[in-house]
Image (cartoon, helix red, strand yellow):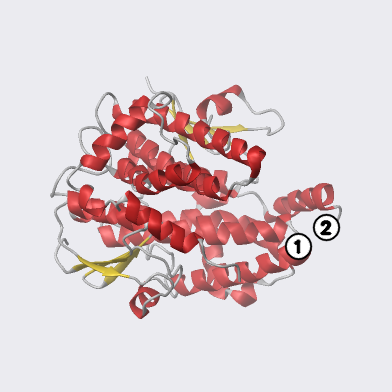
Amino acid sequence: MASGEVKLIGAWASPFVMRPRVALNLKSVPYEFLQETFGSKSELLLKSNPVHKKIPVLLHADKPVCESNIIVEYIDETWSSSGPSLLPSLPYDRAMARFWAAYIDEKWFVALRNFLKAEGEEEKKAVIAEFEEGNALLEKAFIDCSKGKPFFNGDHIGYLDISLGSFLAWLRVTELAASYKLLDEAKTPSLCKWADHFCNDPAVKPVMPETAKLAEFAKKIFAKPQA
Amino acid sequence: MANKPILLDYWPSMFGMRARVALREKGVDFEYREEDFSNKSALLLQSNPVHKKIPVLVHNGKPVCESLNVVQYVDEAWPDKNPFFPSDPYGRSQARFWADFVDKKFTEAQVKIWMKKGEEQEAGKKEFIEALKILESELGDKPYFGGDSFGYVDISLITFYSWFQAYEKFGNISIEAESPKLVAWGKRCMEKESVSKSLPESEKIVGYVAEFRKNNLGSE
C-alpha cells in the first residue's frame, strides 16, 4: 500500500541517508525529513531502530524500515507504479546490482575512508593502490551493467547508481583533503561521465551535500580531541 | 539448451549451505562441486574474480556470487515454487533486514567463538549470546521467521545450526539455555528435506573446528 505518511530520520551529511532521499525523489514521494543532531540520538530513532540505532530510518505510516539499501528496495516496490524501476527486471541483472552494491559498501567505501587515515608514504601508497583497483573494477562493472546507457541501471538512475553516487560528495571532500584525484578521467572515463550525469540529475541535486559545506563539517568531526 | 546449474561450494561453509538449501527448496537439480582452497579451480577464479570465494552459482554460463545474492537469485529465477519472501513490500523489507542482521552481527560474533581464543573469544561469546537473544525475540512463537512458511531469513540462519554443537563445545555455552525457541526452530527446519540434505552432521563440523584450532591456535 503506497498510502500513509512518509518520514525519514537522517542527517544531511550522511551518504547512507542520501540514498533513500534520492529514491523518494525519483518516485516523487513527498516526505518529512527529521534531522538528527550530530552526536546524539533521538528517542524516535532509538525506538524505530533498536537493533542498530543508526540512520537512515524510513517511517511509512509509522512502520520503520532500516538499512539504506533495504529502504531503497522498499521504496522501489511500494511505489512501483511511480517512475521507472530502480532495479533491473532480469534476475541475473538484479543479482549483479546487489553484488556491486555490497562491494561498494564493504570494500570500496572502506578504502575511501582509509585515505584520510593513512599516515606515511608506504601506507598512503597502499591505500591508493587498493582504491584504484576498486575503481578499475567499478569502471568495468559500469560498462557491463549500463550497456551503453548513461547509468548503471540504464536510461534512469537506479539502485546501484544510488549506492555509489551517494558517496560522491565525500569522495570530493577526500580529494581535497588528500590533494589527490580519486576519480580520474584518464583512468576511469566512464565512471567520471556517469558521476557528472548522476550529480546533475534533478532527483539528486537537492540532496547532494555541497562540497565546501561538507568539507567544513568533516574538519569539525575529524578534529575531535583524543579522549 | 540450458545445462544443470553448477554450485561451487565447500562442505562446512554455512554460506555455501544457504545456496544448497535454496536450490533444493525450489526442486532444482544442480551439480555440486567441492572447492579446494589450496588449489582454487579455474571456474571459481573466473566466476568470482573479485572475491575468489564460494558459493558461486553458475547458471546458463553466468555466475552469481555472495550467498544471500544466490538465495535471492534462486527465488527470482524459479519463482513458481516455494517463494522465499512474502508478497507485501513491508514484509519483504523486514526479511531483508533480518537476513542482513544474520549476515553481519551474528556472523561476526560466531566467527570469534570458533576461530579465536582468550579475550577475543570471550568478547565473541558475549556478542553471540546478545545476537541469539535478539533473534529469539524476533522469532517469538512463530514456527518460522517467515511466519507459517520457511523463507529467506530461515534460509540465512538455519545453516549455522550445523555449527551449534561446535559453538557450544569450543565456546563453552549452552545455546538451548540462552535461546530455547531458536533451538526448537532449528529442529523444526531440519525436518525439511531441503535442509537435512544440505547441512553436514554437527559432529563433522566439530571435527573440522577442532582441526582448525589445533593447526592455527595451537590448542582446542
Pointer 2 chain: B
Q: Is residue B125 among what the camera can see?
A: yes
Relative to A160, is B88 above or below?
below
Q: Nearer the viewer, residue A163 or B152?
A: A163
Crowding near pointer 1: few (<14 within 10 Å), some, many (20+)?
A: some
Residue at horizontal 44%, vertical 35%? Answer: A181
Pointer 1 chain: B
**Where does residue A138 sit, x and y in percent of width and height?**
42, 33
**Label placed on residue A173:** none
**Of helix, strand and loop, which one carries label 2?**
loop
Task: Please give the residue where the numbered disc 1 appears in the rendered image.
Answer: B170
**Where does residue A49 sit, x and y in percent of width and height?**
39, 70
Quarter of the rendering containing residue B70: top left
Residue at horizontal 80%, vertical 48%? Answer: B216
Crowding near pointer 2: few (<14 within 10 Å), some, many (20+)?
A: some
Q: Nearer the viewer, residue A33 or B73?
A: A33
Residue sitting at the far top: B1
Q: Are marks 1 and 2 on the same chain?
A: yes
**Label placed on residue B220:** 2
Q: Which kind of residue does numbered mark 1 sit on?
A: Phe
**Where does residue A4 sit, x and y in percent of width and height?**
16, 68
Placement of the C terminus of chain A among the 4 image quadrants: bottom right
Left or right of A196? Residue A181 is right
Residue at horizontal 26%, vertical 39%? Answer: A198
